[in-house]
Amino acid sequence: MKILTFNWHTPYLSLLTKLPHEFDVAPPDVAPAQLTSWDENMRPLTPNVHPVSSDEMQKRIGEPKFYDIVLAHNVKDLIVTKNLNIPKLLVFHNRLSTEAQLGGRPEIVDDYRTQIRSLVSGVYCIFISKTKRYDWGLPGEIIMPGIDVSLYGGYTGEKNVAIRVGNSIKSRDLMTGYSIQEEVVRELPNLLVGVNPEIPESQPSKNWDDLKRIYRENRLLLNTSMPPWEDGYNLAVLEAMATGMPVVSVANPTSPLTDAVDGFLNVDAMGLRKNVEKLLGDKNLAMAIGAKGRETVRKYFPIDAFLEKWDSAIKRAYEWFPYESGVVFDKSPGIKADKVKAPKHVAGGKNIILSYTSMPFTAATYIEKAMAKKHSVLTVGCKITTAIIEKWDLQNMKEAPKTHDIHTPDLTVETDFMLERLPGGFNPDFFLWVETGLGQAPVGLEKLSCPKAAYLIDTHVHFERDLATAKNFDIVFLAQREYIPEFKENGIENVFWLPLACDPETHGKADFPKEYDLGFVGSLTDERRVALLQKVAERVNVRYDRLFLREMADFFCKSRVVFNNAIKNDLNMRVFEGLCTGSMLFTDNAEGLEDFFEDRKHLVIYNDDNVADLAEYYIECEAEREAIAEAGRKLVLEKHTYAHRIDEIVRVVGNVCGWGNKT
């Protein structure tokens, strides 16, 4: 993708540019000469980074489709790009309460929180820590920094000097703890690295290699990121740790350090000074503490996880953006469209047009499979391409996407294109569009004379877009019940809960020996999910894999326990698919889950505190575990297959449209 961003923070941007995208980096909207498009003294340019001037940026903004996405770092960036109708991400690097306090206006926080909600409507929000998301009070994803430890290392500590690293640290004393630093290092050998015009002895590093040399040669880093205004770490702390340099830090609830193990923590200047003096006087201790710190940063701030989360966030922001409706592709003038063959008539069934983007493991595919057993189904839509498969890392998907009866040249269906190709004599009883995360709702649906229904799956992650989409349909089904009241409040009268389900042929039980204690298949981009799996892995054997369809089901069959974790309280596919495999489902709670299943009878519900204890208990108690697993399997087969969901769709559409009692 072609990404437009702004250089508020060259070192952070340099982490992002490891992604496989092209970056135009413009100077921030601040006083001239304060910040440039890129600071090569901080990080070297890479081939995918293109510094542009403000004038060049404005010219490119005016060119249609020049940029695919905007990566903003504050509200100013959003204002500069307000006329760009493309997806936007906003990274929150600081706390609102801290910025307000530094500006001498703490009273604005509550009002500004309210105002910012409207400003970021439709913007995908990223927070660099949990505390920053909490402080802003906005929904969004947490992506903590990532450090490529392999780029650092080589610590010698040969210079008996304590270093401090930071820009504008005196003016930001509230959060940087500059005054405490001065008290700690008074008359001790120390070096201040950074852009600090108000501190004459402070000098920035000459370049990135020079900065790494400073980390390697000097004895320790002093960090005073002050709670509650700042997290207990910053990029300088993580880079020093990655080098193997020991860190002496103010005690902070979010510090990654454990006192006297991989660093030193103290609550006051006197304690900090004692530990600085200890390390200045003992190089061997510094080497030992620094080596453990290096392993800590490798474990808790891995660059691979950072890049995976960011790549996933960029894809989601792009795919979920509510593009304006319009013709997605042009018809070829003068070429007569070929009519497709009508589907086989099914006695007693309905004629249904089913539209979705063809992808083998989506709910839409299972819906088509179940629907075709009782009804005459004609499918319309595009299918995922090789590029999408590679972009989404779906190479393990063994089954190829099917070609629809009416194959469209674009992910978003244009109704005229479909109508020109409908077979003669095929009169649809209703049209159903199923959201798959690719493409938007069909354009021009008002031209269809039959009832139009939509099945929206991921309302928990893009509520506003789904709400706008729903207004184009006569009947709306939501996979997530939680949002039905809000849809009704916004004028969507015919909205119904239709949970996801399982396909017994794909997800059914197979007799395999149990090989794994706890098995999980899914994404590892959610911080809470990863933390839960790590906690469980301390007690039982945890196995993760990226599998699809029957291979996923077989993996679950080989697991004593199938792990599930909801994202934003969603009742997801894995609940029903895991139960269908006959292994015990181990899940957190979700909206509607206990309407269907009883805890400790059909499945086991954990919380963040008891997850490890419960996992260990049910791994050990085989008879109890297998009884729960079998009860869950029987219930899901009796009531929660896609065949059941198709019957419900037809029943609801019939009741709304007045033909519910007709065959």
Image (cartoon, helix red, strand yellow):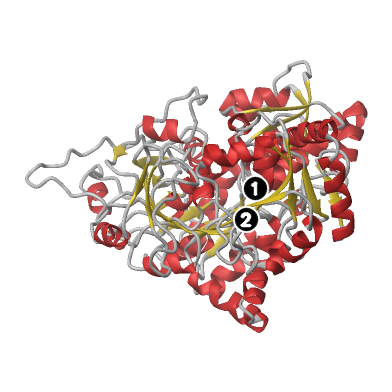
Residue 386: percent from the left, percent from the top? 37, 29
Q: Is residue 385 left or right of residue 494?
A: left
Which residue is labeled 1 in the image? 236
Residue drawn at the location 83% of the way across and 55% of the way down: 251
Residue drawn at the location 65% of the way across and 61% of the way down: 133
Q: Are marks 2 and 1 in contact (CB under 8 Å)?
A: yes
Residue drawn at the location 59% of the way across and 65% of the way down: 484
Disc 1: CA contacts within 10 A as few (<14), some (14-19) or many (>=20): some
Quadrant position of residue 345 = top left
Disc 2: CA contacts within 10 A as few (<14), some (14-19) or many (>=20): some
Q: Kindly report which numbered mark, 2 or 1, lies closer to the viewer in this rendering.
A: 2
Give the mark count.
Answer: 2
Which residue is labeled 2 in the image? 166
Kind of element beneath mark 1: helix
Q: Is residue 637 left or right of residue 64?
A: right
Q: Is residue 549 in view from this perspective?
A: yes
Q: Is residue 401 or residue 200 the one in the foreground? A: 200
Q: Quadrant of the N terminus?
A: top left
Label 2 amino acid?
Gly
Residue 469: percent from the left, percent from the top? 43, 61
Residue 510: percent from the left, percent from the top? 70, 20
Quadrant position of residue 604 = top right
Kind of element beneath mark 2: loop
